[in-house]
DNA sequence: ATATGTGCAAATTCTTTGCATTAGA
DNA sequence: TCTAATGCAAAGAATTTGCACATAT
């Protein structure tokens, strides 16, 4: 489906990469080829991808799967990457543009992912903050059967 | 914190149990002591609990942990139990009263869970249905630092 | 030079499966 | 009776950890 579409021009991708590397460096992390390669994949294809999917998208022999896990750790820590949880036992990761919070509509049949650029939960976070909670965040994922899979049925 | 509070009188619990057993039976499942015991725990203490937490709450020697997993399967299938995913690698289960959709506020420090009886996502599901999706559902969990943990800090 | 990152292997954690045995309906 | 449920052991899947070696700064 409309998953993982490439959507920006090359110049923009380079910019995002440079700025992401700057963030990494600023947090005291080193710039290594696996990390750079991971960021390139994530910037170019958005995701979300599982650790394994990311690994398979890297240039052949780039690094071990373990390094993907560890690198993602650094990327998450610096907020360059957002972890998604589709409730199927595997975490997925996507590049965090930071621009606006978006959510996913996941097809239960074909697992296609569509982004939804509306966030209904701002009021909710506000409410929870009023209840006394600090550092409030939320996860929201939407599941359904996509149009194509309804036809296939 | 205010987690897992016992909140209904005994008669109501018995009623819920009977009705739950009826649902199970109706779906062609057999009523066994582990299932009855699981439902009792879930009705009395709400949850959400992990499989292991449920197992530890059962009368000593009631059944194997595997049976908890398998029983939960039957309970989920019949919608008596709802699976929650707090993104920490362990699923949790709670009794599904079916009355109204609620969400959880999970404290990142102490893991306490507070229920939030407001659902902001009805409009969202409607929107997604308008986009052509069928069988639309969603998961929404809220994370933060609770009042007590802010003080402890 | 030195702390950080990496590879490989092995451990962990949660959950599921196979199969012989037990027990609901 | 006869099929579904259970126990035990073992398999699976995703992720993490230990430790020696390699590499970015």
Image: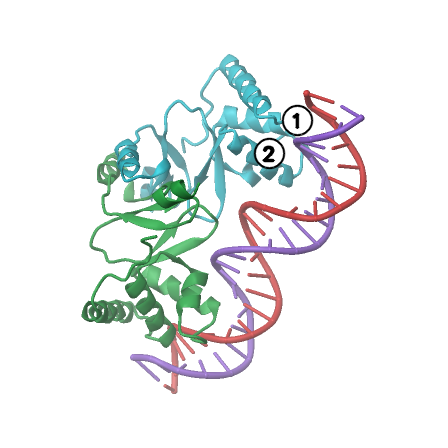
Chain colours: A cyan, B green, C purple, D red
Residue ranking furthest to the top: A11
What residue is shown at x 32% (from left), y 38% (from top)?
A147
Q: Is A82 left, or right, of A152 in this rendering?
A: right
What residue is shown at x 56% (from left), y 19% (from top)?
A22
Towards the viewer: B135 or A23: A23
Residue for badge 2: A71
Cβ–Cβ below 8 Å for labels 1 and 2? yes
Towards the viewer: A113 or A97: A97
- Subunit of label 1: A
Labels 1 and 2 in the same subunit: yes
Q: Position of residue A93 (x, y in %)?
A: 49, 35
Q: Position of residue B77 (x, y in %)?
A: 33, 60
What residue is shown at x 51% (from left), y 33% (from top)?
A76
Q: Is B92 left, or right, of B99 in this rendering?
A: right
Q: Mark 1, residues whose alpha carbon is within 10 Å: few (<14), some, or many (≥20)? A: few
Q: Position of residue B64 (x, y in %)?
A: 47, 71
Q: Mark 2, residues whose alpha carbon is within 10 Å: few (<14), some, or many (≥20)? A: some
Would you identify the image quadrant in which residue B4 lies? bottom left
Q: Is residue B134 visible?
A: yes
Residue for badge 1: A32
């Amino acid at each position: 489906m409309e998953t993982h579409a490439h959507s920006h021009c090359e110049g923009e991708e380079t910019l995002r990469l440079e700025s992401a590397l700057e963030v990494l460096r600023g947090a005291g992390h080193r710039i290594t080829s696996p990390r750079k390669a991971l960021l390139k994949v994530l910037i170019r294809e958005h995701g979300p991808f599982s650790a394994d999917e990311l690994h398979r998208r890297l240039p052949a022999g780039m690094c071990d799967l373990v390094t993907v896990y560890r690198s993602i750790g650094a990327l998450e820590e610096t907020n360059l990457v957002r972890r998604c949880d589709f409730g199927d036992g595997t975490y997925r990761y996507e590049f965090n543009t930071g621009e606006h919070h978006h959510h996913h509509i996941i097809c239960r049949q074909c697992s296609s992912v569509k982004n939804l650029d509306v966030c209904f939960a701002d009021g909710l976070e506000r409410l929870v903050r009023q209840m006394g909670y600090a550092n409030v965040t939320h996860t929201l994922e939407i599941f359904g059967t996509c149009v194509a899979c309804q036809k296939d049925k």
